[in-house]
Image (cartoon, grey):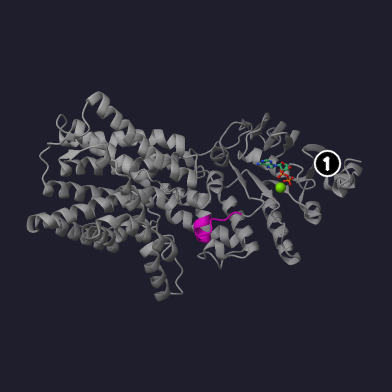
Amino acid sequence: MLRAVAYGVIGIAVVGALAVIPVVASGYEIALGISLLYFTILATAWALFSGPTHYISLATAAFFGIGAYTTAVLGEVLPWPLLMLSAAAIGIVIALFVGLSTLRLSGIYFVIFTFGLAELIRQLVTYYEVNIHRSVGRYIFTGSTQAGIYWQLLGLGVLLAIVGWLITHSRLGLALRVIGEDETVAKHVGIDTTKAKLALFAIASAFMAVTGAIMAPRWTYIDPAISFNPVISFEVVIMALFGGAGKLYGPLLGAVPLVLLFDFLTAKFPNYFSIFLGLTFIVIVYFLPRGVVGLLEQSLARLRSGAGPRPHYMSEGGEALIGRLWSRPKRRAVLKASPDTVPAIEAKHLRKAFGGLVAVDDIGFTIKRGEILGLIGPNGSGKTTVLNLISGALKPDAGELILNGTPITHLPPHRIAQLGVARTFQLVRVLGSLTCVENVIAGLAFRAPPLWGEAAERAARTLLVRVGLGDKTDMPADQLTYIDQKRLELARALALEPDLLLLDEWLAGLNPSELQDGIALVKMLRDEGLTIVIVEHVMDAIRSLCDRCVVMNTGRKIAEGTPATVLADREVVRAYLGDSDA
Ligand code: ADP
Ligand code: MG
């Protein structure tokens, strides 16, 4: 509390001091101040989305230009507040439109698309201006002075800092970090990844558009080449990465020195400017992958070695303001009927083909509540595909899935997770740069109902103790040993308070004593009444854990029954010996 007040006082003092500058400074200094402010805002807005998700967007110039044109076209007819709102609204609409079509892309495809988009919008505006408006550029007479522009940008910067803080301290902020680490995991812990990405992309774009709208009068005359200048997009990326896109204040640390440097370079060596831009980029990528912020954090960590990092991003206030706007999954229905009448899960005639290969062929089974089903069969027989169908990672070509009496066949994975299906992955998937506690909080924060703040942290630590990671709670997940990563994955799955747990070769690769620990853990879960599907090759584990087994071979069910009966079945033995064709 005291800290919050102290930060508040410092913040107000800094903003107050910055606000006085136009009164005392020279014209050149105000112009420089404007550059510093607008690049800081653009880079911070960019990092709000691209920092956590690692989706590198080159569309900054597009949204900036859209904002500038909003002022050019509507500046004289709309009062200032409406003008700003229009710029934000147009930015959001275009961002949602673009986002829906591009956010499915990832990596380099997303980068190229956003760059193409900026060019496309510029061409469209140029076409409109030349052929319909019949002039290449427009004059802007809104009466904004240099000082006015400076103050408007300062206000926008403060608003962005507040919105950014709220987002990074709410579940939405964590959702984006989880998406950046592993989008598949994100879906299976209950995150509506499309919605989270769209929300942030739209918010960031709105800030970029408003920046353009405020800046437009500075040029007096604008044309598409000025307002949609692609260099802005690159500069913004470089500034954000140089400062460090992982922290809210990172882009500020990058924008300030680089604006000053670029200002100097364009004045002294206008012809070589793009070479410097490229060089700066290379230097950042090679020497400062996490930016200035990364350097600062490293030295800070050395200073207070010993004290582990704690989740510092969770705020009840941030969540109360942002979380409600974004999502609040409803508590899932508690099953009223007696356990015997409604199975935990029913699979009917499931089929899934990849091209010509039928990976799952007419598979059906029913699992009672509290039962442990072993799903076994040789490699490539379709076991993982069945788990992917149940958890919603894949959609069946035919067949039906009913969870606790509710059809889930066509639901997206995050909805299925929220309905109580948790899973681990055949190749272990932890959120590497997040600590163990944060990994488990990812499982708590998006389930229905979600857990957040201190309650979430406490629950996460308890779960970590349960799976035997009590002494590694604040260690980054990628520093864990293989077995510990498996334990962490289990803790994250349990965090969802699942009705159905899917374990895909969770015991594979463990040494004999670790295996005994692992089996004991699963037994403990069974004794608590959890319903579990185990895909496993370790026959001892199957015998001691499973109530029943379904045996698959080349996508088909070849046997079903108690472990003892199916493992004695001749067809099963033949399948495992690999001469099923005989
Ligand atoms: P198991 O888990 O029993 O080893 P899988 O379910 O992983 O088997 O795979 C069953 C078959 O489906 C294999 O032949 C595999 O190559 C194929 N397969 C699985 N996933 C895909 C995919 N995403 N695309 C194409 N083929 C796949
Ligand atoms: Mg498999």
Q: Quadrant of the C terminus?
A: top right
Q: Quadrant of the N terminus?
A: bottom left
The residue beneath circle 1 is 561
> Does residue 393 appear anywhere in the picture?
yes
> Does residue 363 appear anywhere in the picture?
no
Q: Nearer the viewer, residue 200 or 99?
A: 99
Residue 403 x, y percent position in the rendering: 64, 35
Residue 344 x, y percent position in the rendering: 67, 38
Is 464 on the left or on the right of 310, as rendered?
right
Label 1 secondary element: strand
Residue shown at the point (42%, 37%) measured from the top left: 99
In the figure, 408 relative to 423: above or below? above
Residue shown at the point (8%, 55%) measured from the top left: 23
Residue 497 x, y percent position in the rendering: 57, 47
Ligand 1, seen in the image, is in the quarter at: top right
Residue shown at the point (12%, 37%) measured from the top left: 142
Residue 252 x, y percent position in the rendering: 29, 58
Is 217 on the left or on the right of 116, as rendered?
left
**First to last magenta residue range:** 429-439
Is 388 on the left or on the right of 574, as rendered?
left
Q: Main secondary structure of the magenta part?
A: loop
* Furthest-front residue in this view: 271
Q: Within the image, what quadrant is residue 565 found in?
A: top right
